């Protein structure tokens, strides 16, 4: 018997969508206001979905405390109140929320072994959300 579990976390961070190889005008054309030189912030809502067999004795897919500990120590601690452009993960990659989903999915998939990591979903604003499932 397999079930899915989705857990939600919140963290604020800032970013600027910009590529050095483009001209100023091209960057504005591609990224619009998101290319503002001083960046801008979001209150990101991160959802991680994991799956697995429901344990016969605990009745759970995985231990929520373990999931929370991993999320806080290996993911949130990196991105919380950060300027995403300054992080090594985005040295050569635009810190779009699409790419943030990929980065966070990879961290969970490599490091969290108590359940299968199915999907990362990030709400950037009330209008935008992004998903990545590998
Ligand atoms: Ni933005």
Image (cartoon, helix red, strand yellow):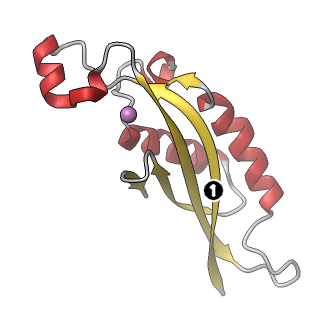
Side (left or right) of 18 relative to 102: left
Q: Quadrant of ligand 1?
A: top left
Cβ of mark 1 under 8 A from ligand 1? no
Side (left or right) of 82 relative to 91: right
Vertically, is 132 above or below 89?
Answer: below
Q: Quadrant of the C terminus?
A: bottom left
The total number of labels drawn is 1
Which residue sits at x=67%, y=51%? 112
Q: Quadrant of the N terminus?
A: bottom right
Which residue sits at x=61%, y=70%? 51
Pinpoint residue 93: horizontal percent, then vertical percent: 35, 26
The kind of secondary structure element at disc 1 is strand
Pinpoint residue 7: horizontal percent, then vertical percent: 65, 60
Pinpoint residue 75: horizontal percent, then vertical percent: 63, 38
Which residue sits at x=78%, y=46%? 69
Vertically, is 39 above or below 78?
Answer: above
The part of the image, by quadrant, that contains residue 10 is top right
Q: In this rendered view, identify the residue nearer to me: 43 or 18.
A: 43
Which residue sits at x=39%, y=20%? 39
Disc 1 crowd, CA 10 A, few/some/many (<14, 14-19, 20+): few
Vertically, is 12 above or below 68?
Answer: above
The part of the image, by quadrant, that contains residue 11 is top right
| Residue bearing the label numbered 1 | 8
Pinpoint residue 53: horizontal percent, then vertical percent: 68, 78
Vertically, is 124 above or below 121?
Answer: above
Extreme-right residue of the structure? 57
């Amino acid at each position: 018997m397999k079930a899915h579990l989705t857990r939600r976390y919140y963290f604020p961070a800032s970013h600027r969508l910009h590529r050095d190889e483009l001209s100023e005008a091209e960057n504005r054309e591609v990224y619009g206001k998101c290319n503002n030189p001083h960046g801008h912030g979001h209150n990101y809502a991160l959802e991680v979905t994991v799956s697995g067999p429901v344990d016969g004795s605990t009745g759970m897919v995985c231990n929520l405390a373990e999931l929370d500990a991993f999320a806080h120590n290996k993911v949130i601690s990196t991105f919380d109140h950060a300027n995403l452009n300054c992080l090594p993960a985005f040295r050569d990659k635009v810190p779009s929320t699409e790419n943030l989903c990929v980065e966070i999915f990879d961290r969970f998939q490599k490091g969290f072994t108590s359940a299968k990591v199915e999907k990362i979903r990030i709400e950037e604003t009330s209008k935008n959300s992004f998903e990545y499932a590998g």
